[in-house]
Amino acid sequence: SIVALVVLLVVAYLTLGPGAEPARPAVALAAAVPIPSPRPPIKLAAVQATADAVFTLTPGALVPATPPKPTAAPPPASPAPARPAPPQATATPSATPTSAFSPTPEPTEPPTRTPTVTRTSTATPTETPTNTPTPLPSPCDAKVAVPRLGVGSGFFVTFTHEVTGELAFNWPAEGGRILVYQDKPPELGDGQSGTTEGVPSVQAIAQGTGGGGTLNVPNREPGPYTVELFNASASPLGPGEATVHYWTYGHCP
């Protein structure tokens, strides 16, 4: 290249020095100046080494490229045996890629909580059970409505005497008789009260007459009793009202 040629000329000039002056008459020069000794021969190897060094250190110096040697073309490859085509793969649905980074939600202000009213529980007073007083026996004066009675017929009433004590009966009908039985005579039939003909065959524990007087039966033990109001007169009686007195624990009609 041009740069390499210039470098070679500079190296040659520095090695050989400036050019010789023009020739003068040989006689005169020979008398005045001694004949110089001949210069040593130029060493081409040293010049080549210097030029190589300059090429190496000089930026932009280009080494002439050596053209590549032509190579023989490779022999044609023999055709490979045909392989059976692989089975066609069934397309598998690929999962939709999910982004590893989710969008950062915008900050939202926390909701304002509405204060709730806390109810203060009040202690419910516990009711103290009150002792139910044991009922005390008391006398009962039951009023009995006596229907109209024919001659020889009567009306009976059965009651329960619950405490040992007296019994008392009052029937203001003139000509009537009061008969008291313990339990209930079977001749009187069913029911707590009703009319009957005649008097039972069972002996009465007490008996009295009607009118203004009262029949008292003292110290009778608890149990069922029956009183019959019988018309012993020669004419019908009633209707009227009689009173039956006995003791009970609040079972007074």
Image (cartoon, rainbow, N blue to C red):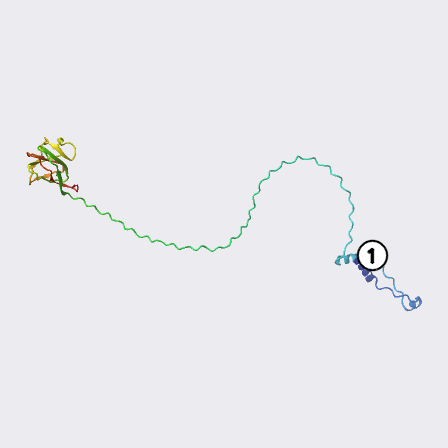
Query: Where residue 172 sits in the image (x, y, percent)?
Result: 8, 40
The one of 107 and 233 positioned closer to us in this rendering: 233
The one of 201 and 230 positioned closer to us in this rendering: 230
Query: Where residue 226 sits in the image (x, y, percent)?
Result: 12, 35
Which residue is denoted by mark 1 in the rendering? 44
Name above or below for residue 132 compared with residue 195: below
Query: Where residue 202 sits in the image (x, y, percent)?
Result: 10, 31
Per the image, label 1 sits on a secondary structure element best described as helix
Name above or below for residue 106 compared with residue 229: below
Query: Where residue 33 sits in the image (x, y, percent)?
Result: 89, 68
Relative placement, left or right, of 238 versus 24 is left
Relative placement, left or right, of 191 versus 1 is left
Name above or below for residue 51 compared with residue 160: below
Q: Residue furthest right?
A: 27
Relative placement, left or right, of 195 versus 89 is left
Quarter-wise, where is residue 242 in the image?
top left
The one of 238 and 17 positioned closer to us in this rendering: 238
Residues packed near mark 1 inside 10 Å, few (<14), some (14 to 19) or many (20 plus): few
